[in-house]
Amino acid sequence: MLAGERRKKIIDLIHQDKRVLVSDLSRMFEVTEETIRRDLEKLEKDGILSRTYGGAMLNRHTNEDLPFVTRNALNTDIKRNIALKALDLINDGDTLMVDPSSTSFEFLKLVGNKNNLTIITNSINILHEFANSTMNIISTGGSLRYRSLSLVGPVAHDTIQRYNVDTAVISCKGVDAENGVTDSNEPECELKKYMLRQANKVILLADHTKFDKTAFTKLVELNRIDYLITDRKPSEAWLKRLNEANIEVMY
């Protein structure tokens, strides 16, 4: 197994169990404990975990902002299932604003079968991966956030305000009944607010781990969301709250 593949599996394990032990990982991947320690050191530098005596624990902060390559490797099956549910909401010829989240990226992989779509995005990864697609892709331009492979700032804001679109497709870091929809970093959150203002309807892609979480900065109140697509049936309390906000829930 290559080092990069092993580290991806370690990321999945630590998000699942919140902590890992060097000895367990060494046995699991059949490598030396020193190799595992180097893996954990690399992941600590990426801000994913904090090393502890004999292992490591997951970093969890309201402003947690994992690199895109890390986020894109996590829970891909869940993201793909959420993306599949969103396809019925998109029609041939639609205009979309799409954020740089890894879930939105999975969504675009599937929605490409629709005809004559126009995509406005601040995602560098989308611009690169779909350069040869049949979709009409418009870049916002702006200042590069290398960590998230996104473009932000005044230039991106100005571009967004030139267009009125059918749908904004976004993800988030937290969905809370009182605090609404929140995200981990302010520059991207500000750009998403511009996207929401220019869209006729808003689709929020959020897996079950985002519920009852509040991240660093406020994105929008719940009642601005038209469709919330997730991977599990929310609790009855949540279904009631979403119904009160006139949000159609798909799971």
Image (cartoon, grey):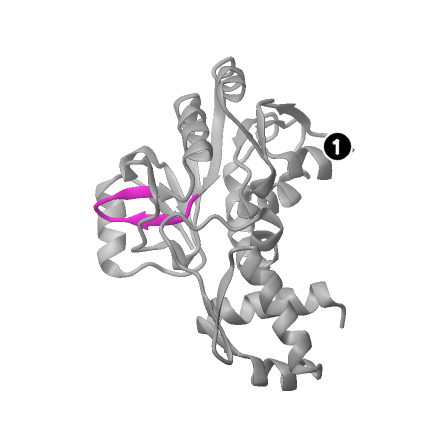
Horizontal and vertical percent for residue 3?
A: 72, 67
Say which residue appears at 50% left-offset and 20% top-offset.
160
Horizontal and vertical percent for residue 173?
A: 41, 48
Say which residue appears at 76% left-offset and 73% top-offset.
1
Q: Quick one: which residue is furthest to the right in this view?
A: 132
Image quarter for residue 190? Answer: top left
Horizontal and vertical percent for residue 25?
A: 60, 80
Say which residue appears at 64% left-offset and 86% top-offset.
27
Say which residue label 1 marks: 131
Which residue is at the front of the view, 151 or 194?
151
Q: Secondary structure at mark 1?
A: loop
Tally the marks.
1
Query: Relative to residue 10, is residue 214 drawn left or right?
Result: left
Q: Which residues are magenta?
A: 172-181
Horizontal and vertical percent for residue 39?
A: 64, 68
Say which residue appears at 39% left-offset and 23% top-offset.
197
Quadrant into which the C terminus falls: bottom left
User: Vertical placement of 118 versus 149: above or below?
Assistant: above
Q: Is residue 173 magenta?
A: yes
Q: Is residue 30 magenta?
A: no
Query: Relative to residue 234, is residue 98 drawn left or right?
Result: right
Q: Amino acid at mark 1?
A: Ala
> Is disc 1 surrounded by few (<14), some (14 to 19) or many (20+) residues within 10 Å?
few
User: Vertical placement of 56 versus 117: above or below?
Assistant: below
User: Vertical placement of 84 versus 185: above or below?
Assistant: below
Image quarter for residue 70? Answer: bottom right
